[in-house]
Image (cartoon, helix red, strand yellow):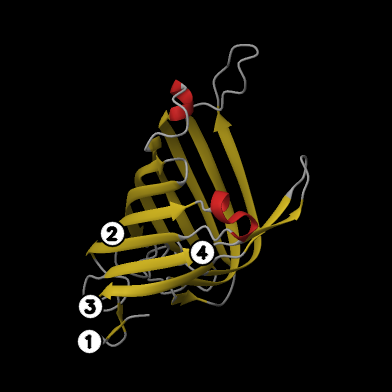
């Protein structure tokens, strides 16, 4: 079951980003608009959700699509960059996993269509250095491979590049609360994910820059998340 920060082994990735922009007056600079549409797909060699193995055989194709509406930005009102809330945006979208191994599929349903997730929420930019957000996620299975799980996620990310420069870690955190269904075990659980994403600018170029990122994540059970046999709750 897919979520923010799930682990994946990727051997090919393709993505495309679209911007819906309105016309801007001459010499006023580019107007990127208030509404954006982003999407893409991954081909992965194995699908793990927060360390929980979903499938490791066959072809796994994972397309996704997100719509984002930018409600507020300090740049829009020429308020400088020192305000506590630098931006506000709403988003919603879907993520899917189609698997040729027909993982857990049942008769009468499309056995290849393992998962469809629906999500929506809000993100808040803070001091132009951090992002805090809240989102709702519903994990569903068109093939009836698993029961629908619903959760509320709280997330936080920090851009520490101004302080650490080339050694910036870009730390992040996610806390997820299951309120209907569960990813593993028999009890609704709470999950925490801590991560860093050090980056390296491999090729400096105004036209074709290349930057490599090395994300590292750890998943922790805050309460009844990693239930190994229905009773034992593993922390990590």
Residue under circle 2? 151
Task: Tell me the CA gap for discs 4 and 3.
Answer: 31 Å
Residue under circle 4? 196
Residue 130 visible in the shown view: yes
| Residue at left offset 40%, top offset 42% | 126
| Residue at left offset 53%, top offset 54% | 63
Q: Earlier in the sequence, mark 1 or mark 4?
A: 4
Q: Of discs 3 and 2, which sits in the foreground?
A: 2
Q: Earlier in the sequence, mark 3 or mark 2?
A: 2
The image quarter containing residue 83 is top left
| Residue at left offset 59%, top offset 62% | 198
Q: Earlier in the sequence, mark 3 or mark 1?
A: 3
Q: Are marks 2 and 1 in contact (CB under 8 Å)?
A: no
Q: Which mark is residue 186?
A: 3
Q: Which mark is residue 206?
A: none
The image quarter containing residue 139 is bottom left
């Amino acid at each position: 079951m897919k979520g923010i920060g799930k682990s994946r082994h990727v051997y090919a990735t393709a993505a495309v980003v679209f911007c819906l922009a309105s016309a801007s007056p001459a010499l006023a600079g580019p107007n990127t608009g208030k509404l954006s549409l982003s999407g893409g797909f991954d081909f992965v060699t194995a699908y793990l959700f927060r360390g929980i193995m979903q499938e490791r055989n066959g072809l796994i194709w994972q397309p996704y699509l997100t719509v984002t509406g930018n409600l507020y930005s300090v740049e829009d009102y020429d308020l400088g960059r020192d305000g506590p809330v630098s931006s506000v945006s709403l988003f919603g979208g879907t993520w899917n996993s189609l698997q040729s191994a027909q993982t857990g599929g049942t008769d009468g349903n499309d056995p290849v269509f393992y998962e469809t997730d629906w999500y929506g929420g809000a993100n808040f930019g803070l001091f132009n250095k951090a992002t805090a957000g809240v989102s709702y996620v519903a994990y569903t299975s068109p093939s009836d491979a698993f029961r629908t799980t619903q959760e509320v996620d709280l997330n936080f990310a920090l851009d520490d590049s101004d302080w650490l420069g080339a050694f910036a870690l870009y730390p992040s955190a996610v806390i997820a609360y299951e309120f209907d269904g569960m990813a593993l075990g028999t009890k609704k659980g709470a999950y925490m994910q801590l991560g860093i994403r050090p980056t390296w600018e491999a090729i400096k170029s105004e036209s074709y820059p290349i930057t490599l990122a090395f994300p590292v994540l750890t998943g922790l059970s805050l309460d009844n998340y990693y239930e190994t046999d229905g009773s034992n709750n593993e922390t990590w």
